Image (cartoon, grey):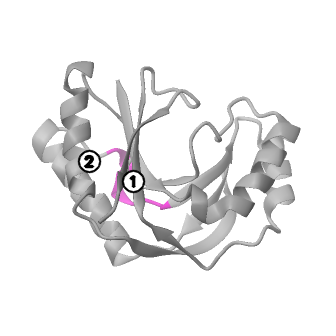
Amino acid sequence: MFIWAGIDIDNELTEVRIKALLIDKKINFENSCFVLPLHISLKAAFEIDKSILEEVVSEISNYFKTINPFKIEIDKLEMYDNIVWIRMKRNTYLDKVHDELNNILLEKYSIKLHEYDLDYKYHTTLFMDSNKDSIKEAYHLVKEVDLPQNIKANQFIIGTSETGELGTYKIYKRIKML
């Protein structure tokens, strides 16, 4: 069983989502990134034994319930390898949440850091595909969309997948911040 956790920012980026969905349908990617709400991942997805799913989700949820809403500044829209994403500016609070989540998972469940967690790039993925020409086309179609300067983080989401494959994650739990 695979788990992923992030900040739900779908309501903060409605216009971007609408435009990106139209592009997603036009290009017909291998896997759509729109099976989940727009979000900022807080850790690379990780695998656990299914028997401890409820315990791990409860642990993550309890941690998230201690966090107050906060703002995140948007950096830019960019194409990175085979991905088009919205990059978020690093900030001390976002780093703190990321690091504390990783520490809880390491200490309580021996879930090691993924290489991406070592220098995490906070982002919201719009498109991902193995066809780089499709990614370039999507980037050119979406690059003029207006992005807000900052967004409010006020809800976390936890997703699960049996296989960990792109497109198979489903929302398992939503957690409102204090």
Q: Which residue is mark 2?
A: 61
How busy is the neighbourhood of tag 2: few (under 14 within 10 Å), some, or many (20 plus)?
A: some
Mark 2: which amino acid?
Answer: Ser
Q: Position of residue 4 (x, y in %)?
A: 39, 40
Stretch in magenta: 114-122
**Which of these two is toward me, 67 or 76?**
67
Residue drawn 45% across the image and 21% down it:
163
Task: Tell me where residue 147 sits by quadrant.
Answer: bottom right
Mark 1: which amino acid?
Answer: Phe
Residue drawn 68% across the image and 31% down it:
31
Quadrant position of the N terminus in the picture: top left
How busy is the neighbourhood of tag 1: few (under 14 within 10 Å), some, or many (20 plus)?
A: many
- Measure the C-alpha gap from mark 2 to mark 1: 8 Å
Residue drawn 36% across the image and 35% down it:
3
Q: Is residue 82 visible?
A: no
**Which of these two is toward me, 86 or 68?**
68
Q: Is residue 58 visible?
A: yes
* Tag 2 near tag 1, CB within 8 Å: yes
Q: Earlier in the sequence, mark 2 or mark 1?
A: 2
Q: Position of residue 91 (x, y in %)?
A: 40, 76
115 within the magenta span = yes
1, above or below 154, in the image: above
Quadrant position of the C terminus in the picture: bottom left
111, above or below 74, in the image: above
Residue furthest to the left in view is 108
**Which of these two is toward me, 102 or 67?**
67
- Horizontal arrangement in the rendering, residue 19 relative to residue 39 (left or right): right
Residue 156's tag is 1
135 within the magenta span = no
Assign a secondary structure to mark 1.
strand
Task: Tell me where residue 42 sits by quadrant.
Answer: bottom left
